[in-house]
Image (cartoon, rainbow, N blue to C red):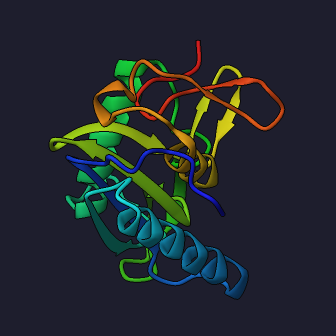
């Protein structure tokens, strides 16, 4: 895919998360996302890329890296007026280890978080009143934005169908 942005990703760090075990189709999607992200680093659209795995689900009543990350993402979503549901969800689940039922956080198969100067700017996937914004939407936005990173929160990115899409930092209006 041709990248039309100018490649000035100074200070932009992307964190990519994938479930630790994925079905074959989702594993191929993960590999494609990672390749595109690496290409964005190579093209100068992104300064740094960190990849990590996380569990499919974690108990809500126990501390975990996944839960701390979710809490930061949820705070961002509340601040900008979007929702992480249905991609991040809570469910009543059975624990094979304890034999007890409890409330668990279910994490998406793939997730991307973008930071500018170590400040969380956006998380994909998320939902807006206009619909879902996927990890692939995020990659397209990074590839096609033609502005300086400091302007990500002010510039719009048009979707293929001409509809206004949220920028990397702000939800759709």
Question: Depth check: 104 or 81 in front?
Answer: 81
**Can residue 100 be seen here?**
no
Residue 13, above or below 23: above
Q: Quadrant of residue 14?
A: bottom left
Looking at the image, the residue that sits furthest to the top is 173
**Can residue 162 be seen here?**
yes
Q: Residue at x 50, y 29 (%)?
A: 167
Q: Is residue 93 left or right of residue 17?
A: right
Residue 166 is situated, as x and y percent measured from the top left of the image, at 56, 27
Residue 135 is situated, as x and y percent measured from the top left of the image, at 57, 53
Quarter placement of the C terminus? top right
Residue 129 is situated, as x and y percent measured from the top left of the image, at 66, 20
Q: Is residue 48 left or right of residue 134?
A: left
Q: Residue at x 27, y 44 (%)?
A: 115
Residue 15 is situated, as x and y percent measured from the top left of the image, at 33, 60
Quarter placement of the N terminus? bottom right
Q: Residue at x 62, y 43 (%)?
A: 86
Q: Residue at x 49, y 45 (%)?
A: 5
Q: Is residue 19 left or right of residue 44?
A: right
Residue 84, above or below 96: above
């Amino acid at each position: 895919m041709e990248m039309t942005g100018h490649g000035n990703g100074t200070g932009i760090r992307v964190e990519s998360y994938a479930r630790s075990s994925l079905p074959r189709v989702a594993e191929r999607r993960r590999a494609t996302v990672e390749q595109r992200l690496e290409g964005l680093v190579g093209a100068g659209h992104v300064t740094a890329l960190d990849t990590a795995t996380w569990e499919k689900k974690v108990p809500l009543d126990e501390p975990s890296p996944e839960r701390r990350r979710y809490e930061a993402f949820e705070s961002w979503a509340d601040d900008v007026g979007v929702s992480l549901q249905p991609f991040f969800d809570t469910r009543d689940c059975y624990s094979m280890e304890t034999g007890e039922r409890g409330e668990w956080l279910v994490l998406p198969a793939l997730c991307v978080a973008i930071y500018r100067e170590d400040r969380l700017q956006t998380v994909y996937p998320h939902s807006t009143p206009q619909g879902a914004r996927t990890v692939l939407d995020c990659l397209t936005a990074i590839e096609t934005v033609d502005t300086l990173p400091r302007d990500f929160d002010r510039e719009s990115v048009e979707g293929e169908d001409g509809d206004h899409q949220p920028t990397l930092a702000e939800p759709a209006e």
